[in-house]
């Protein structure tokens, strides 16, 4: 992913790198956790329609307005409400009603590793919290890495 970030920067375009965990964020060039970068609420499930708490004129607000790519590593670990909150926020910020406000969002991760953690939740609760259970999943293009 760092190669992709470098390519975008070479083309003088803006890319934002985030991850669901702090460890994964440290491996990305300029990476931050998604909750930190997008100012997501800590408990996404207790709000009806959570959204990002980034101001329109702030530095991050300006970056999100101008960026052409958001890379989100370890996306499988994050609750679907985080992605839905980001989408509502980007649509409002960019005044663009397309999916994710027209920004390309690259979700990376292994769905065979860790699903979102739901305290005292069942397996069904974890699956329901996954991005695969979101309406956004149907708008995404799935790519698979293969070895040659």
Image (tube, rainbow, N blue to C red):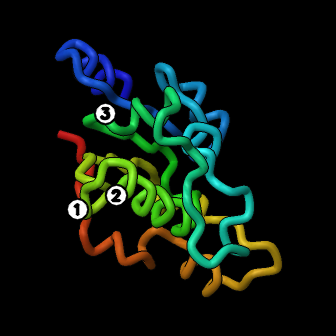
**Left or right relative to 111: residue 127:** right
If the image is split into quadrants, where does the N terminus sit? top left
Label 3 – label 1 distance at C-alpha? 15 Å
Q: List x then y, in percent, for residue 61.
A: 46, 37
Q: List x then y, in percent, for residue 59.
A: 50, 27
Q: Nearer the viewer, mark 2 or mark 3?
A: 2
Are the residues tagged 1 and 2 within 8 Å (C-beta)? yes
Vertical comparison of 115 with 127: above or below = above
Vertical comparison of 3 with 136: above or below = above
Q: List x then y, in percent, for residue 148.
A: 17, 39
At 27% from the left and 74% from the top, the residue drawn is 138
User: Mark 1 or 2 closer to N-term?
Assistant: 2
At 73% from the left and 56% from the top, the residue drawn is 42
**Is disc 2 placed on a helix, strand or loop?**
helix
**Left or right relative to 114: residue 8:** left
Residue occupied by mark 3: 67
- Is 46 or 53 nearer to us in this picture? 53
Question: Residue pushed farthest top?
Answer: 10
User: Mark 3 or 1 closer to N-term?
Assistant: 3
Residue occupied by mark 2: 91
């Amino acid at each position: 992913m760092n190669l992709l970030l470098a390519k975008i920067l070479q083309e003088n375009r803006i890319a934002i790198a985030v991850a669901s965990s702090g460890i994964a964020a440290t491996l990305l060039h300029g990476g931050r956790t998604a909750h930190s970068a997008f100012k997501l609420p800590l408990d996404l499930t207790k709000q009806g329609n959570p959204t990002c708490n980034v101001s329109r004129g702030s530095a991050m607000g300006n970056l999100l307005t101008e960026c052409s790519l958001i890379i989100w590593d370890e996306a499988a670990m994050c609750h679907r409400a985080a992605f839905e909150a980001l989408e509502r926020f980007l649509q409002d910020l960019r005044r663009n009603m397309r999916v994710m406000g027209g920004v390309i969002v690259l979700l990376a991760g292994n769905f065979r590793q860790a699903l979102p953690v739901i305290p005292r939740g069942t397996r069904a609760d974890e699956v329901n919290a996954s991005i695969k259970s979101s309406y956004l999943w149907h708008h995404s293009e799935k790519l698979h890495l293969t070895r040659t």
